[in-house]
Amino acid sequence: MSLRQELTIELIGDTTRPIYLDLAESIIRDIERGRLKPGQVLPGTRALSRTLGLHRNTVDAAYHELTMQGWLVARSSQGTFVAEDLSALENRSSQKQPVAARDILPGNKVTPVLLHVSDGTPDPRILPRNELARAFRTVLTSPLFLFARDYADPRGAFELRKALADEFLNARGLSVAADDLLVTHGSQMALFLAASVILKAGDSIAVEDPGYPFAWSCFRSAGAHIVGVPVDEGGIDVDYLEQLVRCDTSIKAVYVTPHHQYPTTVTLGAGRRLKLLDIARRYDLTIIEDDYDHEYRFDSHPILPLAARARPDQSLIHIGSLSKLTAPALRLGYVIATPKILDRMIHLREIIDRQGDVPLEQALASMMTSGALGRHARKARRIYAARRDFFIEEIRKRFGEFVTFTVPAGGLAVWLRVDDRVNVDNWVKTAEEKGLRIGSGTCFSLEGGTGLNGLRFGYAHLTQDEIGKALMILSASLPI
Ligand SMILES: Cc1ncc(COP(=O)(O)O)c(C=O)c1O
C-alpha cells in the first residue's frame, strides 16, 4: 500500500449538512492546520471511500467541491493534490504561531508581523464559504451568465438592488425601490462618486474631526477644502456646524458617520439628527451619510439612518457597505440618493468602471433572498458581541491605568483614549517591532494628531486567543 493511500481524514461529523460537505470542511480544516501541506497528494477516491466507509461518489463530490473552491488541484492521471498557491494561508498560519517570549523581550531585533489589528473589519473565517461558493457556481453556470452578449446595467444586478431595497424597507425604514439604488465596488467607490458629483474645485465640505481619512481623500481629489467639526460623546457638534456654515458659504456638503462615528464609535443622538437635517435644509447642504456598519448593533436594535428621517426632497446621499457583513475583499457598496444626483453618479460610474461584478452581485443577492446572509449576520453579531465583551474585560484588566473608553453599542472596533503619559505613535511603533501591527489613532485627526492620543482597535476579526496575544504584545510595548 502506498503512503498516499494510508492518509486518512477524520470527519467533523456535522450531521446538519450533506456528508460530502462535511468531508470537504474536514479537508479544509486539515489544510488550515498544516496537516495537509501545499502540493501534497491526497488519497485516491476509491481508497479514501474505503477508509472512511463512504460511497466513492461522496468522496468524489467533496474533491470536486474543493477543486472548484481552489483548495485542491486535480491533475489528470496523477491524482488530486492540495493546491500549491495557498500563500495567503501560509501567512495566516504563521500568524497563528504562539508568540514566543523571546519575541517580546525588550531590545530584541525586529520580528516579522505576527498579528495585524484592523480598524474594524469582519472575520472572513466565519463566512458561510460553502454557501457562497455554491451561489457563485450557480451564477457561473446559469444561462444568464453564459449567454450574456452585452455589458450589464451600470447600476448593478437588478436581483441585488431588489434584495437590498426589500431589506432597507424592512430593517431600516427606507422606502426605496430597486431603481433608486446604485451598487458600487465597495462604499469607497460610492464616496468617490458622491464627492465628484456634488463638489467642485473651491467648494468646501464639513467633516467630523476626528474622522475617516479615506473619505477626506475623495473630497480632496474633487478639489474641495475640508473643514473640521468637533465630535463629542453625542456625535458631531451640530451647533458648531451651524455657526460654521452661517459664516462660510463655500461649504456645500457635510459628511457624517451617524450610526457609529468613525473613529470614536459614538452614535449621533436623536436631537442632533433632527437638527442636522434641519441645518442642511436651511443652508442648502448635501448630507453624505456613511452608514458603513449598520448590521452591528449588539445591545439594541440598529438606529434608523438619517435617510429614513429625511424629507423626499432633501439632498442626502446615503452610502452603505456589504464588506463589514462579508469580507473587505468582497467589494460591494451601495448608494441611495435623489434621482438627479444618482443619475450623475451612475453616469460617472459607467465612465470609470462600465458595470459592477455581476457574478458577485448575483451570488450575494441569492444569499440574501435565501436567508443565508441573514443567518450569517445573526451568527456574526453573536460572535462579535462575545469578542467585544472579552476585549473590554481584558483592556480593563491590563490597561485600566492608561486607557479609557466607552463600551460601543455596536460596530467592530473600540476607540481607546490613551493617557498623555503614553505617546501612541511610539507605542504602535514598538508594538510593530514586536510583531503587532496596529494603526495609531493620531491619523484620524485633521490637524495631524494634535490632542488625539488614541487607538481604534478592531477586535472583531480576531479570536479571543488572538486578542489575548495582541494585548500581550501591546502590554510589553508600553513606552513608559
Ligand atoms: C467609515 C468607513 N466608510 C467606508 C468604508 C469603506 O468600506 P468598503 O469596504 O465598502 O469600501 C470603511 C471601511 O473600513 C469605513 O470604515
Image (cartoon, rainbow, N blue to C red):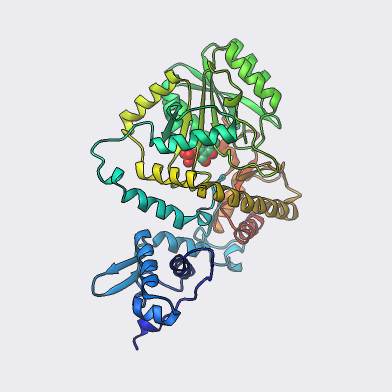
Picture coordinates of residue 185, whole percent (x, y):
41, 38
In the picture, measured across the screen, residue 334 lies left or right of residue 283, that is left
Q: Position of residue 438 (x, y in %)?
A: 56, 49
Residue 26 visible, this orientation: yes
Q: Quadrant of residue 190?
A: top left
Find residue 188 and report its horizontal and vertical position in percent: 45, 35
Measured along the vertical axis of the image, is residue 261 above or below residue 81?
A: above
Q: Nearer the viewer, residue 320 or 404?
A: 320
Q: Residue at x 47, y 26 (%)?
A: 219
Instruction: Using the image as rendered, state which of residue 453 and residue 33 is in the foreground.
Output: 33
Q: How many marks?
A: 0
Answer whether residue 438 is visible to the viewer in this image: no
- Image quadrant holding the N terminus, namely bottom left
Residue 24 lies in what quarter of the image?
A: bottom left
Q: Is residue 158 left or right of residue 299?
A: left
Q: Residue at x 56, y 30 (%)?
A: 446
Instruction: Identify which residue, 407 or 180, lies in the foreground.
Output: 180
Residue 63 percent across, percent down from the top left: 37, 68
- In the rendered view, would you say 26 is above or below 1? above
Residue found 58% across the figure and 53% down from its top: 430
Residue at 58% x, 31% y: name it.
257
